[in-house]
Amino acid sequence: MNRIYNFSAGPSMLPLDVLQKAAAELVCYGESGMSVMEMSHRSPDYEAIINDAEAMLRKLMNIPDNYKVLFLQGGASTQFAAVPLNLIKRTGKADYVVSGQFSGKAFKEAQKLGYDVKCIATTKEDNFDHVPVVTKDMIRPDAAYLHICFNNTIYGTKYPYIPETGDIPLVADLSSCIISEPIDVSKFGVIYAGAQKNMAPAGLTLVIVREDLLDYAEEQMPTMLEWKIMAENGSMYNTPPCYTIYMAKLVYEWILEMGGLEVMKEKNVKKAALLYDYLDSQDYYIAPVKKESRSMMNVTFVTGDADLDKKFASEAAKAGLKNLKGHRSVGGMRASIYNAMPYEGVEKLVAFMKEFAANNPKA
Ligand SMILES: *Cc1c(COP(=O)(O)O)cnc(C)c1O
């Protein structure tokens, strides 16, 4: 076995323990005589898997009873449309914060549907190097919801606080930071996340929605986008992404066994600190994100020279540190250090960065 350190932003590394457990039961799950991939989603064996997945996630995130947990498909991007289609009828208008590419796409999707949506804050003019300050008085008092992206995967920023919205439901895209640390779910109306960053392979989208927000779907709502129907059917209105849910269950179990999200956070804080402390200690690499907005999951840096950046990513890959190239829209480097990235992976990265800086002096 020759596994490398994979710093991909998503799909991304999965815990080795989880992959090995999945491998061990790949061909024959328990006493079922078949693979989870081959099971009817209505079978008792599978019912137990999806029920366990939900129960474990509820325990892990301490999800209050008045929230529904939905295991859906279509990626976080499908929720960019599903959010307004499920919620805007509450008042007829909604507000957005644009703090990066994904929140911009979410805003555009709601606009495309012809809705009255307003961008109340953006940091576009600063190349999204921090998240905007959001206060309650900025939100239209009759907004159906405020939408934010909590961790901006591409730019490597994250809100250092949960915006206070009063009675206006806060809707948040948590794709790249979910289950990286404890979060107070009760502060949100809706949380959604694609699974392929920090939870499972691609193909699963998680939606956590407060029950009182299930009653505002549009009349002409596509059934597959309607949270209420999915909730009433236990995420099984149609065939759910069965195997990916099973993988998510293994990931939840892995975190619960290590002690839950407090322990997960401790590990993540330590990894991110190792990398940011190094970045702050030298001047060969530049970390473009303002300190108070730094993401714990996606760490961006540049050399200031596009050719050197390119050389860095390619030499790092040869040294077993893969996918460090920044997003195609921003360039530079990005190290995604999700839950599954071990501390040693970040140690190796920092050692490589030092070596690269020593061997490649700037002109
Ligand atoms: C990756 C990502 C998305 C897009 O997710 P898909 O599942 O590919 O649609 C949306 N938002 C954030 C924050 C992401 O990191």
Image (cartoon, rainbow, N blue to C red):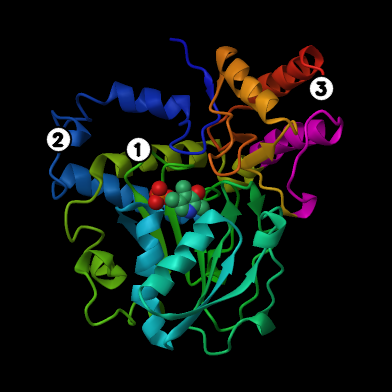
- Three-letter amino acid code at disc 3? Lys
Residue range highlighted in magenta: 266-292
Disc 2 from disc 3: Cα separation: 56 Å
Classed neighbour count for the residue bearing mark 3: other residues with Cα under 10 Å, few (<14), some (14–19), many (≥20): few
In the image, is residue 237 part of the stretch drawn in magenta?
no
The residue wearing badge 2 is 38
Where residue 120 appears, as percent x and y from the top left, is 61, 76
Q: Residue 41, how many percent across, how many down?
A: 16, 47
In the visual, does 351 lie left or right of 239?
Answer: right
- Residue at 31% of width from left, 53% of height from top? 74
The percent position of residue 245, horizontal first and vertical second, equals 31, 44
Sooner in the amino-acid sequence: mark 3 or mark 1: 1
Q: Which residue is mark 1?
A: 247
The residue at label 2 has a CB less than 8 Å from ligand 1: no
Tags 3 and 1 in contact by the CB under 8 Å rule? no
Q: Which is nearer the eye, 17 or 151? A: 151
Whether the residues at callouts 1 and 2 have beta carbons within 8 Å, the answer is no
Mark 1 and mark 2 lie on one chain; the one further toward the N terminus is 2
Q: Residue at x 55, y 37 (%)?
A: 339
Residue 60 seen by the camera: no
Q: Earlier in the sequence, mark 2 or mark 3?
A: 2
29 up-or-down from 59: above or below: above
Q: Please, what is the dominant secondary structure of the magenta stretch?
A: helix
- Residue 80 picture location, percent across and down: 41, 63
Q: Quadrant of the C terminus?
A: top right
